[in-house]
Image (cartoon, helix red, strand yellow):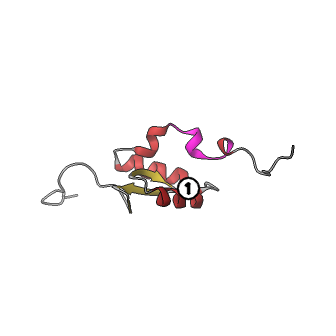
Amino acid sequence: MTTMTSHPPIRAVTPCQREEPEIWFSQTPSGVEYAKALCRDCPFRTACLEGALERREPWGVWGGELFEQGVVRPRKRPRGRPRKYPLSA
């Protein structure tokens, strides 16, 4: 019997296997940015993103990108309505 892989097991190198699953489905903008940052150096980032697009994932962070309703979004908006007037500094 021969081994077909020359790299360490996936569980040893990917952030999605080390971190809690809830991180990848955060409801807050800061939580989503944290999850995306964890993906930044992952060697499987491209494959993860391609797989999520192929599966039409409805939501979550996949391959360093945010999916909402099956569409890749640049960032997560906070809950509630936007302010009518900007805050003064």
Identified at 45% across, 52% down, the residue is 61
Residue 75 is inside the magenta segment: no
Mark 1 lies on residue: 48
Give the image location of residue 14, x and y in percent: 62, 47
Q: Nearer the viewer, residue 57 or 79?
A: 57
Q: Quadrant of residue 9?
A: top right
User: How many numbered markers are drawn?
Assistant: 1
Residue 19 is inside the magenta segment: yes
Q: Which residues are magenta?
A: 12-20
In-image side of 27 versus 45 (left or right):
left
In-image side of 31 versus 46 (left or right):
left
Give the image location of residue 69, x and y in percent: 33, 55
Q: Specify the farthest residue to the front.
A: 1
Identified at 54% across, 39% down, the residue is 19
Q: Amino acid at mark 1?
A: Cys
Give the image location of residue 89, x and y in percent: 23, 58
Q: Specify the farthest residue to the left.
A: 84
Q: Label 1 crowding class (10 Å Cα cut-off): few <14, some 14-19, many 20+? A: some
Give the image location of residue 62, x and y in percent: 49, 53
Identified at 50% across, 36% down, the residue is 20
Q: Nearer the viewer, residue 54 or 87?
A: 54
